[in-house]
Structures are given as C-alpha cells and as structure tokens.
Image (cartoon, grey):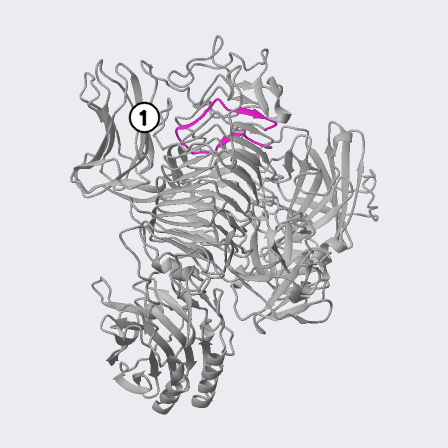
Amino acid sequence: MIKQAVLAMALVSTIATADTIGSWTFDEGGGVVVFDDGPGAYHATFGPGAARAEGTYGGAVCLDGTPRAIVTLPVPAGKQFGRDSFTIRCWLCPTRLDIDSKYRIRRLFTFHAWPKMHVYIDVESSGNIIAWIGHQPDGQPKRGCRLISKGQARRDEWTHAVVVCDREAGKLRLYIDGVLDSEGALSPGFDADLTLESPMFLGSTWQSFEGLIGEFSLTRAATDASQAKASYAASQSLYAAALPAAAPTPVRNTTQPTAFFVSPRGNDSWSGTGADPNAAGTDGPFRTVARAAAIVGPGDTCSFRAGVYREVLRPIRSGRPDAPITFRNHDGESAVFSGTRLVTDWRKEEDGLYSAAMPWSMGHMNQFFADGEMLTEARWPDNTGTLLQPTRATVAGGSVNTITDPNVPGDEDFWKGAWVWCAGGSSWHCWCRKVTAFDAATKTLTFEPAFTPADRWYIPRKGNHYVLMGTRNALDAEGEWWLSAAERRVYLKPPGGRDPNGMSVEAKQHLSVIDLSDRSHIRLFGLAFRGGGLMTNKASSHLLLDGLKGEYTGHSYRHDVNANGSVAINGKRIDIINCEFAHSSTTLLRLDGEDCRVANCYVHDGDYAGQWAGTVRLRGRRHIVTRNTFRHSGRDLISTSGLAESIVEYNDLSHAGWLTHDLGMTYGHTTDFMNTVFRYNLVHDNMADNCAMGIYFDHLSMNVIVHHNLIWNVGRDPVRFNNPSYFCLSYHNSAWKVGQTGTFDHSRRNDLFGSRFHNNILCDKVKLPAHVVVRGNVVSDDPGFVDPENRDFRLKSDAVGVDAGVPIPGFNDGWAGNAPAAGALEHGERVWATGHNFDSPPPIPEWAPVNVPFMNGVFNSCFEFGLEGWDLTGQRKAKTVRGNGWGNGYGRGEVEPTGTCHGELELGPGTDGVQQTLAGLFPNTCYTLSGWLKVCNDGEIAELGVGAFGGAEPELSQQVRSATWTRRTVEFKTGPETRSAVVFVRKTSDGPGRVRGDNLGIPRVPAGSDWERPPPEPVVKRAPALPMPAPFRVKRAAHPITIDGRIASDEWPGTEMALLQQPGRTRIKGAPCTARLCQRDGVLHVAVTIPVRKADALKRGSSWGKDDGIEVCFVDAKGASPAYSFALHGFCGGATESVTDGGAPADAAARLGQAARFAATISGDSWTGEWAIPLAAAEIAALPGMPLAFNLCIHRSESNEWILWAGTLGPAWQLANAGTIVLE
C-alpha cells in the first residue's frame, strides 16, 4: 500500500487539475484483479499467463511475452483519450529484450483498431522505447507521430517512462527517468478521436513485452516537464535497485541424480538434500516450492513433506527421456498445493457479520473456504441444498431482459448490481447477467445485456430456475460471504455463528497451482492440490500424473473457466492415472492434444454452474480413456466435440443433468470422430428433467462407433445420432428404462447415410430413416435381464435377446447359441469390470487403431485435419477452407443439403486434385464410395472416383456441375488379388474457378460382400396447407356475459370460430375445437370448448406446453407498427398467467393479467375456458370497426396436439402470420 500512497501523492501534486483515467499499482499481492485507484475504479484483470512479482518496489505484474500474459484495462469509451491531450506513465523492467522476429520490438501498451487507429508503447531489442500514435481517416494517409527514445531501458533494471500527447501544442513527448528524452510533432490537422468500444491492454497478442510493470497510470491531460520529473522522483526510491540475482545454486554432483526435499520446516539457503533439518540447524530441506522448482534437473527427484504450500509448482526446466524429473509426496505424507491465501484479522460487524481486509481479488472467480469447506457467495434464495442440487427460485414470467417472480424480496434498490444465474428458456445451460433494476411493485428484475427475440432457447420463461447473488443485501445466511471491491474487504456470516478468527478462512488467489506448460519428461506422484487447477500446453509432452488429488479446481458462475480452472491437459503422450478430481463450476478434466491416456481416475461433481462444457471434456487424437468413474455434472458428463481416433472404454458414467435439460451422458457435435469408439461402458442415471439422452451425438457427428455398452435410466434415446451425420454405428448395446431411438434435424434433411443399428436391446420404438440399416435389434420392455435393478444385465436362458442378433463377420464371431445374442452380453457372459479401482489399479493399454465392420475406411474423410492423409495431384493447389457448420446456420440460417463441420476441400484453379490409397480391402468384394461435391464457379466440373482396385475399368467416377452440394456414389468391386484402391477428388475442368468436396466415405464391409442399396426414403404425402382464416367479426353482446366457464345459448351472439389448424397450417388429426367471441363495453370475451376422449386424464396443472390449456394472443394496437404481442394462458384447472413470450414488457403483461378474468369447467367429454379481457388494460381503445391481429392456441395433452385458429408456422403469438378479428 506504500506504493499506492506514493503514486496518489504524485498524481495530486503534479497534475491536480487533470482528469485521471486510471491508476494501477499491482500491490494486491495475489488474485487476477488489479485494482484501479483512480476515480473510475476500472479494475484490470490478468490473463492466465500473467503473474505477480514482489520486491523492494512493492508489487508488479510479470508478463511472459506470450499472448496469454496480457492485462486488460477496461476503460469505457467515454473515459478514453477521445480528442483530449493525455499522459501515460509507467515503471517498466524488461527481463528479456531480444526476440526472434523480423520486427525486433515487444509491445508494452496496446490500444488500437488497426490500421484505423492505434496508441502503442513498444520496447526494441536494443532497449529503446517507442511511443507511437496513429490515425488513418478513410482514403487518406496515416497521421500521428512515432518517437524512438535516445535512452534505453536495460534488462533487469527499472525505467520510468512518461508518454505525453499534447494536442494544444501539437507535440508527442517521451520522458525517460524524469527527463525529456525526445519530442516530435503530431501531423498537421491531427484530430483523431482515440475512442473504441474495446479495452486497453498491457502487453499484446502480438510480440508482447516480457518483463515487469511496476505501476501504470493514464490521465486526460498533458504533463509538463516539471510534472514528469516530480512523478519520477515520487517513487524513484522504490525502483532504484536492479532485480536481485537468483539465489546461489548449491554445489551438486551433476552426473548423478539428486534427491531434494521441501518442507515447511526448511530453509532456501540450505542444500535441500535432507528430508529433515540437521541437529545443528545448518542444513536440510528447502522451504519453498519456487526454490526447488528452480534447481531440480533431469533425473532428480523432489519430495514434499507434509504441509500446505501456497505457491505455484512451475519447474524451470524439463527432464530427458532417459532422466525424467520427479516431484512426489514424501513417504505417503499429505503435501497440498493450495491456490488460496489465509484471510485473517477479522473484525466483528453488526447482524452476526465479520469483515477482514482483502487486498486482492479474483473478480468473478472469487472463492472462499472455512476449515476446508467451500463457502457460498451471498444469494437468494439461501442454499439449503448442495452445489449440484441447489435451492433455486422459479421464474413466473420473463422476457429478453426481465424476470418476474412475486416471491423476490426487497425494495427498489435491493438487487441493483446483483447477478442473476438462470437456466433460462429451454434450460440448455445456465447463464449469468447483471441486474440493472428492480421494480418492487411488480417484482420484476431487469438485467443486461439483453437477449434478442431470436434467442428464444435462452430467454427466461415461466418455470425456469434462477438464483440472485453477489450483493450485500443477500448476506443473511451462515456460510455466506460478500466482497466489497470499493472497501477491499470481505464480509462473512461464519458457519455455526463462530468467530472466524478461530477458523482457517482461505480465499482463492491463483488460477493454477501446478503449471507444466512447455515442459516434458516430468512425473508427479501422490501430490494434492486445491483451490486452483493444473495446466499443460500444446508444447508439453511425456508427462505422468499419478495418484494426484485435486479439488475445487475452478470457480465462476459468470463465465466458463474450463481453459484455466481445471486439470487442463494439452500436449503429447501425457498419462493421467490413479487420480481423483472433484468440485468445479466448470470442467474438471480437460483433455486435448495427442496420444494421451486417462486411466483409473475418479472425476466427480463438476460443472456446478451448469455451463456448456461437461465435467470431463475430451478433444484431440488417439487418446485412451479407460477404467474411470465419471460422476455428477450440471450438464453433460463428457463433452466429446473435437475428439478423434480415440477409445473410450470400461468407464462407469452416471448422474449428468442436475441443473439443465436436453443433454447426454456424453455429448458432441460438428466433429469428424475418425472412428472413435465408445465400448464396454456403463452409462446410467441422466437426471435431466427433459430430453435426457444416453450416448448423444448431435448434428454433424461423423464416423463414430458405439458398441457393447450398458445404458439405463435415461429418459430418451440410449444412443442418439442427430442428422446430418454419416457412418455412425451402434452395435450390441443393452438398454433398460430408456425412451425411443430416433434422430432430428432442424432442417429435416433426415440424413444418416452409412449408419447402422445392429443387435441392440431397446425398450421402445426405433424411428430412423429408411436408408439406415437396422437389423437384429430387440425392442421389449422386458428383455429378460437377470436383475437389472442391481446391474445384472446377463440374459436369462429364455430371454428374447438370446440368438436374436445377426452375424457381423469379424466382429461378433464365436457366439454361444444358434446366432449372436442381441445386446451387450452374449448369453452366459458376465458384465465386464468398469470404473476406477484405486486398491488394485488395472493395466493401462496402448492405443491401437480399431477395425470394426462397416466403419468408414477413408482417412480424414471430412478434411477436418487439413490435407493430412491426402496426396496432391494436378496443379497441386488443393487446400482446405472454412466449412459451413451444420449447413443451416446452426438451426437458424438457410439450409444446405449437407453440413461440412469446420473444413471443406477446395480445388483449383486449373485441373487439380487429391487422392488417397486405401489399404486393407478384401479381394472380390463390392464397395461403395460416396462423397459430396459442388462447383463454386459456372462451367467448372468436380469429380469423385476410385481407381487401382483391380477391376476391368482402370477408374470409375461421377461428376458434379452444380453449385449446390450434391452427393455422388461410385460402386466398385475389387479384383481377385487386389487389397487396395485409390480414392480421388478432382477438378477436371481447366478453368480459373474452384470446386469443393467433403464428407467422403467407403464402409469397410466384410469380405465377399455384395453391394447394399438402401431403399429410397418413402415419399411423405404432406397435407395441403389450409388457407388463412378470413377476418372474424366480433359482435357486441346485448347482455353482460357471466364468466363461469359455461356457455349459455342466449349469451353469445354471432357464429362459432373453428380451431383446426396445426402450427404448420395443416389440419389436426383429432377433433376440432370451437371458440366464441363477442365484446361489450370495451371487454373482449372469448370462450373455447375443447373435446377430449377422457376428461379424467386432463392435466390440470399450470405449465404451458405440458398441461391442458388455452392461449389467447393479440397484438398491442399502439402506433402504426405493433411492437409486441400479448399472450394469456388459461388452464383446465382454472389457473391463469399473462406471459411475455410475445415480447410484451413484464409490467404490461402483469397489468393485463391482473385485469383479465378466467374460468374453466370440465364435463365428461370436453372442457371449456372462458375469458373476459378488458382491452383498456392493454392500452387498446375498443373502437367500432377496429381490426386486431389475433390468434387462439390450445394444447391438448392426450394427443400432444397444438391446435390454432391460424397456423403461424411458429408460436401462436407470431401474429404477423396469424388472423384478424374486427370489432363491430
């Protein structure tokens, strides 16, 4: 805090009239937040590669020269430089100047929208400092000024730099250590507005500064020479010394491995080679992790004695293949690396609260513990549940930026500045937004940023669950905390009402506590870590993590921190074995890279913030994930997008979906899985309330194999492939207590080409396209398992699945009876061992490619890995270009016949091509090549073909001349001695245009197979669209209408309105409904009668879309262009609600709901709902002859029908596509 005071004095004394933008001193001592001591409180944040340093100078930020190590200064546009003069001050200390680049500079400060505008401070390899301001108006040359200092910053020494842009004098000045070093003129007429809707940065994603920054400030005023000198003098004493040299390295025999030790009783001046201090207290173990990490080298072992180490383990060097470096716990002792720091000196406050100084912050990642237990950020409602089953409030109504709930406590200002954490809309994931206002009268919260109406899957609506958190007003329950950034104090209501001075209270201060980035040949054994993650990077390799225990690795309800708040593994040949990882708001184990193995691990209780990524996230190639137990997740258990050529086997996977809906135990999409196989797994207990899948592959999941899995207690498909997806195989899976097996595509392409479902035991119907090969499956709600309640899925001797399967040569040979059994277990076979076993660790297999009949034999068939596996031909100009994703804008855009994930092949100009040799084919066997082609330019020709297969023709091919993606197939039969073929894609025209190709395939059929030609899809005869109903004239009632749910014959004038359209404007299959409308004294009366088969089966709740109800929709009639639609729901049980689904503001919907009246009655074969709607409550003047956009919608639960007056091709409240009523 000394430096903070010094800087404040300097700012006040030297530029008392200046407009201080921000002042950052890096004195926090921990965390990722850098507090701004200026009036704006624009607190900065560290990137994951930035670190803190401390010395005689106080605190500093250390940038490591990478794009990860930047500091974000969130100065809002209105407080940036604009057209004013400004000054930038900083203390800097380069730790490295040289750089291997054409441009021999490193960027210290970045504020730009290149090339239009920029403000930079750079440091050259020579140490010269560059100040550069530039602006380039449209169509004009760049203006500004670029200065290069005469003086130089020296490595490991502090330099004070002041950059002054003096608009009035037209000058740019650079002061070094309080003295004017250089000056230059701004371009004539320089009037640039240096304002952006983006932050400023210390460091850069391009050639970032490497070194320390001790303090940094920005002001909107030009500093003169005396002020620059005073600024330097005010803190010069803190920065007078050079960085200290590293501690002396102990003398050691470098030819032999050395055993080092670290202990809380150690001393960094000792040799570190003793496990305990000697009797004289002159030698023994090291004290700090940093000292040990700096000295160990290849072949060395470093053992940690029992204790808590609040440091980051970051080895300075790598081991060697023949001499790895080992870090381990000593003789089974508990050595814990903690990402936390003790919070002490608690002061008693009112209402049972205590407070303590908190000079650091992790921003949205703040996390506190008391005696090892995680504490809860102040929230409403108070959490009496668990992290994954928390107490949550329920939305009564919502809109793009509001939530209404009559149970929310507090006055107008109570929730302003809080955060709402909500599983909104379809509850696919939980999002977090800042509350900007609260209307205590209507109990409506307003949050920002708002969604758009197109975000209907996320917009809060009735029944969604949410929590309010992050305000002192909610600090009322034991175990809750709240951090005041302004006071830099944390407030706590201690568990059990205890005095926190008698407890161990800790606060998170590090993202990761073990960092093996850029390191190789290192082994970790038996270490524990908590309150922070473990990370490697793409350059890491040959690491072993054995017996580690990590918990509370990452925390944030506002953002997904899986990249640096987890066990984030990337690199090559990394083994994670015998480990336990638990408790994270996001992913616990994040695997990427190549040739890694995860074996015998227990990973549980992840994603308690309900974010997109699963508890385990698998990406990369040739991984083995085996014999693990993965359990408990807020959303998916395993996220698999980006996984390829991998094996996921013998795992016990359970209890996903605690917080969200529409998910799988595993979930992936938009991926060429390259014959990744999921086999011999137990997959069970998906807890999602809606759309709970087992093994789930969403759109564009290519080349994936699922066989021999046991799947139970999932509400929907046991194995699901949404489409378009190609060459997906489901063999020999057993399912129990599951739903139907089907597929879905937003754009109804219904394309699962090359996919097969064989020999599965299922509980419910299979509804797949006709071209999918479906054979040998058993569908039964009693398939004859021995004891499925207790996980015994063996088949009884009389089970329907015995001998029910079909042979798959080379895959299910050696069956016990007359034919293969359906399901995962052959008759008499027992369930395999799955999950982790720490007492008797299983052997770990090496990766080997799989060979499953009918899998795709074309390598990199979707060009997701560039041109790997392909040889260039012709002009050799082939390349890959960006794919079209799902081929329909991810469900929102125009539809293309196929999706191409992330990459497509592009050929041209001129004749061009690629080819691939496929080995391992069988002689005298019929194969079918398929692929998608299109041309980008008229007159060009794309060609798909095969050659060198031993047939009578040297090549067979098909061409495409269309600009629309078109699938082509080529049948060929190998010769009697031929075991290979050459597949090619060519541009055969020599024009300057280009052609594209993607999604190729040749199934690896059994030897001697004939061609399979799936039947064509049946032609679906769609009912003709019904016409839009004519305007309906609403007559005036002569007598008052009684709202009782009964229609008296003398009450209702005029004719009946027929309700018989589906949303798609086709006729409903069930009995039509009827409505009557009239109006009297400005009140619109609506009565609807709904025929049902059995009234006793009516669902009488108040959940729209689930229970039986009526929706009345009409447009607001204010202005020439209506802004929104009102929507009222009335249910057969008598409940009502006024919702904001059509965009009505929450207060307007609430007023209408309070004014409207509804009643319902149920008879033996129908029910009737009756409304009285005062139009004035919707601010509509009921004038004779006035037209009103209008619609009615009924949900009839017994047939799950939606019945409308006018089908809108969407929700009933989309009144632009609905009908009109006219008031008489």
- Number of callouts in the render? 1
Left or right of 123 on screen, residue 854: right
Q: Quadrant of residue 407?
A: bottom right
Left or right of 118 on screen, residue 589: right
Can residue 455 be seen at all in this image of the molecule? yes
Left or right of 1207 on screen, residue 202: left
- The answer to whether residue 716 is magenta is yes
Q: Position of residue 973 (x, y in %)?
A: 26, 17
Q: Position of residue 127 (x, y in %)?
A: 25, 74
Q: Which residues are magenta?
A: 715-738
- The answer to whether residue 790 is magenta is no
Instruction: Identify the residue under disc 1.
Output: 1002
Q: Position of residue 1196 (x, y in %)?
A: 68, 34
Q: Foreground residue, 535 or 916? A: 535
Query: Image point 38% across, 81% down: which residue?
Result: 87
Q: Secondary structure at mark 1?
A: loop
Residue 546 lies, with reference to residue 444, above or below; the image says above
Q: Position of residue 13 (x, y in %)?
A: 45, 90
Residue 1158 lies, with reference to residue 205, above or below; the image says above
Residue 504 lies, with reference to residue 159, above or below; the image says above
Q: Foreground residue, 1036 or 192? A: 192
Q: Residues within 10 Å of mark 1 (few under 14, many from 20)?
A: many
Q: Foreground residue, 799 or 375? A: 375
Tag 1: amino acid: Ile
Query: Image point 32% across, 54% down: which residue?
Result: 297
Q: Residue furthest bottom?
A: 226
Residue 674 lies, with reference to residue 289, above or below; the image says above
Can residue 1117 be seen at all in this image of the molecule? no
Q: Foreground residue, 231 or 858? A: 231
Q: Residue furthest top?
A: 818
